[in-house]
Every structure is written in structure tokens, then in C-alpha cells.
């Protein structure tokens, strides 16, 4: 486990960006097409820049964890059922 020397708190190993992004999408409710979010909205929540988000979302899409849709000409993203399962697997 990693310790924050300023607080003495042990926070554990750092989570990879893809997993952090999956967890964030889950926590903010992007779990179905009707709740899909734009890159800009995801960027506001995650504080990741657009190119980084595009890279990770593409990778997660290829793995089947994130689905891309176009709603009224706007690109949006949400978790798939497999993405939700992947997030929940960290708790078991």
C-alpha cells in the first residue's frame, strides 16, 4: 500500500486510468443509453483532457465495457453491462 506522507493515510496502489474512468462513469450514473454523457461532461467529472479521454474510451469500447452512441448528432458514452460488472468486480 502507498502512504501519503502528509497524512499518514495508506491509500493502496494507484488505480489505472481505464479502471478509474469506468468507476467514475458508474458512480455518476452513465449506465444506460438514456444517461450517456458527452466527452465534455466526462471531462468535467474526471478532470481528464479530451485526447486522453478519447484514447481510454476507445480502448474501453474495444473491450466491450463502454458503448458509444450518437444522440442528436452528439457523441455520447455509457457503460455496457460488462462495464458495470467490471466495476462491481473490484468490490468482491
Image (cartoon, grey):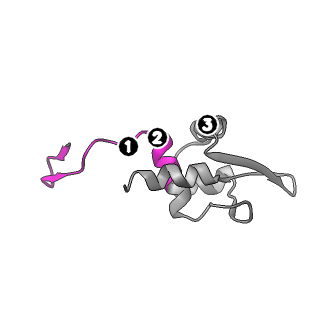
Rendered-image quadrant of the N terminus: top left
Q: Residues within 10 Å of mark 2 (few under 14, many from 20)?
A: some
Q: Secondary structure at mark 1?
A: loop
Eye-nearest disc, 3 or 1: 3
Q: Position of residue 28 (x, y in %)?
A: 55, 64
Q: Secondary structure at mark 2?
A: helix
Rendered-image quadrant of the C terminus: bottom left
The answer to whether residue 13 shows anywhere in this view is yes
Q: Quadrant of residue 51?
A: top right
Q: Residues within 10 Å of mark 3 (few under 14, many from 20)?
A: few
The residue pinned by badge 2 equals: 17
Earlier residue among tags 3 and 2: 2
What segment is highlighted magenta in the picture?
A: 2-23
Earlier residue among tags 3 and 1: 1
The residue pinned by badge 3 equals: 63
53 left or right, relative to 23: right
Determine whether label 3 and label 2 are within 8 Å by CB: no
Q: Position of residue 29 (x, y in %)?
A: 58, 65
Asked if the stretch drawn in magenta spans residue 13, the answer is yes
Residue at 64% x, 41% y is 64
Tag shown at residue 15: 1
Asked if the stretch drawn in magenta spans residue 19, the answer is yes
Kindly report the distance in space between the C-alpha atoms of the residues bearing marks 1 and 2.
6 Å
Q: Residues within 10 Å of mark 1 (few under 14, many from 20)?
A: few
Q: Secondary structure at mark 3?
A: loop
Amino acid at each position: 500500500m502507498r502512504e501519503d506522507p502528509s497524512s499518514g493515510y495508506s491509500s493502496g496502489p494507484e488505480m489505472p486510468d481505464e479502471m478509474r474512468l469506468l468507476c467514475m462513469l458508474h458512480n455518476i450514473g452513465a449506465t444506460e443509453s438514456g444517461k450517456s454523457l458527452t466527452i465534455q461532461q466526462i471531462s468535467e467529472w474526471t478532470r481528464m483532457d479530451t485526447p486522453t479521454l478519447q484514447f481510454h474510451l476507445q480502448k474501453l469500447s474495444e473491450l466491450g465495457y463502454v458503448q458509444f452512441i450518437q444522440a442528436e448528432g452528439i457523441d455520447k458514452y455509457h457503460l455496457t453491462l460488462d462495464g458495470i460488472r467490471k466495476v462491481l468486480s473490484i468490490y468482491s
